[in-house]
Image (tube, rainbow, N blue to C red):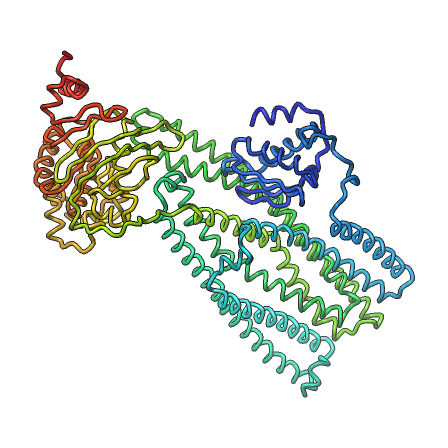
Amino acid sequence: MSLLLGAAAGTRSVEVDARPRSVTPGRQRWHVELVLGRPRAADVLAAALRRIPGITEAQANPVTGGVLVRHDARVHATDVGHMVRRAVALIADDPTEAGGRPAPARSAPAPAPRADHGLAAGPVLAVGGGVAAGIALVKGSALTRQLVAAGGVAAATAAVLRKAWHGTVDAAQDAAGPGTERHALLEIVGPHRRRLYRAGALSVACQVSELALGTLLGWTGLVLIKGQAAPLVGLGLTTASAQLFGLAGMVAAACAAVAGLSYASNLQWRRLGQDIEHDWRGRTYRHVQHLELGHLEGERTSRVAGALTDDVGQLGAFFAGPANEVLQLGTSLALLVPAFLLLAPQIAWIAFLPIPIVAWLSLRHQDKAAADYADTGERRARLGSQVINSLEAGATVKSFCTEDYEAERIDELSEAAQESGRRTDRSTLRHAETVRACTTASMAGTLLIGGRSVLDGTLRFEVFSPLIGLPQMLLMRMSRLGGIVDQYQRTLASYDRVQRLRALPVETDGTGGTVDVGQVRGEIALDQVSFAYPGRPPALENLSMTIPAGQVTALVGATGSGKTTIARLLMRFQDTDFGSVLLDGRDVRELSRHDLRHAIGFVAQDPFLFDGTIADNIRYGSFGSSDEAVVQAAMSAEAHSFVTALPDGYETVIGERGAALSGGQRQRIALARAILKDPPVVILDEATSAVDNETEAAIQRTMRVFAADRTMLIIAHRLSTVRQADRIYVMDKGVAEQGTHDELLAQHGLYAALWRLQAGEPAA
């Protein structure tokens, strides 16, 4: 990144036409004139952006001039904007990079025939419309001029909304993916479309009731001022008293309708949002549980958790709130604009003049605030992460006497988050007060111009009075337009992240049928196995070995010699690159993963315990086991004595990851879990590394009994753990030595040297 930005900074100044179209956390869309109609420039720009650290993906479209940039959340949104502009400036400064020829003038490239018609029609319509409007304003009547002004307001509103619509449609198409025909929101709603329509109908009815209530209140004022409201005379209410009583009843009915419909619609929307969130979380989490372990380990746990919590929550939150506001805003526009044009065209333009202004201000504020919100969120995330890290590292902090240092670090991060929050607050408050000023000015203008029309007789007071307060309801909703668009784009970004998580491949099952656990003998063979983790040297290369059925086999050797990799291949957490792993002569890749893993008990070096009771953790995976079986398994794992010493015994809650237990106690609980499972094959990966020598000896005695008539594979660094094994393989870039403990000592090789080293004997 430094090379690219340094080169860009050192180039001559170039006027770059690069404009952001949408900015959401982790993704930005730009319009870059340089790449329009120039595929070579588009490829170069995309390649240059992808080379910048922090940018995970970049695409440039020479047909539309659009540039999509995805970036890591740790990169500030404003910094990404600087990177895009500098990269465009760098390419613009070097015409050969942009396509091997100087950049053509704006009028040089010949668009496609259809685009020609569009480009020609736009200026012609604009000029023609301007001339016609000018003639109407100069020579037309007062009503004509007012209608022209209203048309101008409508055109400005359409232009602002069209820009917002194109941005959201592009975002929706990008989120839905190239192979999806339906809109992303319909994909999110899924099977709940009928409920969506029902909630939408309730929202429309609620908004109609609100407008009716506003009209009735206007008629009430009209009765108080003039003694009657003409529309009510036709209903048989001829006197002021009768009209007031009638209006009181209608207002009460309208209030009840608004309250009831508002309650029903909001409840429907909230339930819809909750159900969408629940469905997506359930389906996505089920998918994550079946991911290949290699892909799951390749994703950051916090990122996966964020998709399952925050992103899935955003999918439901949009329908619980902003979607309802969109329908209410649309209903208000659909009813009020025709009403004003038909009943009071004289004041339609001034009543709705703030609409394009407020819409533009809201969208502009949201575009500007997006980077500030992203920056604030990022700084708060850093602060939260540091707080958690400092608290979790409490023992380390105290042992190094760095309490004050950690407090200063938190103060610095908190001050940065505070300043970012203040900047965002200032921008938000400026926007809110500007909208308030526009709304107040519209109210005043409507009163003045409408009042003059009433006084000169061109507008009846009976029409003016009920309409005067209605536009304010619309303007207050219009001020939320930017927030609605922002929530919409955040929803699409969240949907995109969830879909990318759901696109990760799940584990495939074998093709060779099921495995009868009761019939498994447990003979394991590796035949010319080679395997390498991505981006690393081979962990195993052309390895062949046999682990006999019904015996205890041990793997020892230095860290990185491939011991744990063998266990992972046998469990099919990974599959071999070359060669085969066989169980009873059958390739494990052909076996059902569920049946294979059901036949193998696995105890890791750092076993995971769930937040629950000790009994629940021992019973995990063998949920139907009796309390007596749980106790017997704990006794076999030498865990019963310390469990019964606890105040609640087997019902003791051990906290997240078994935080209430020591390392040795956690390993014994994990051993008890494997013993209760009673599989024909058991893998112990450093399963006694965290226990003392006395406990290790007791566990070894128990495991000798447990190992009878089953295959046990022990992976260990501590050789005292494996000295009783029937066969020991010494791993060192393959199998260096093999034999029993006594046979290996007699060979005076690597195993004997390791034994003397651990026993504290001098080297021979």
- Residue at screen point 47% across, 36% down: 414
Residue 669, position as x, y percentages in the image: 18, 42
Left or right: 533 in relation to 750: right
Given residues 413 and 281, the one toward you in this image is: 281
In the rendering, at what x and y percent does residue 276 appear?
Answer: 45, 59
Name of the residue lying farthest toward the right: 139
Residue at the limit of the structure toward the top, as seen here: 764
Indicate left or right for 606 with 460 as reference: left
* Residue 12 percent location from the top left of the image: 71, 25
Mark yes or no: residue 160 visible. Answer: yes
Indicate the position of residue 599 as horizontal and vertical percent values: 20, 47
739 and 384: which one is in front? 739
Name the residue: 12% across, 33% down: 696
Q: Quadrant of the C terminus?
A: top left
How many marks overall? 0
Specify whether 230 is left or right of 627: right
The image quadrant of residue 543 is top left
Q: Residue at x 25, y 23 (%)?
A: 732
What is the quadrant of residue 577 in the picture? top left
Quadrant containing the N terminus in the rendered view: top right
Q: Nearer the viewer, residue 281 or 240?
A: 281
User: Residue at 66% of width from left, 35% of height from top?
Assistant: 40
Residue 406 picture quarter = top left
Residue 228 seen in the current view? no
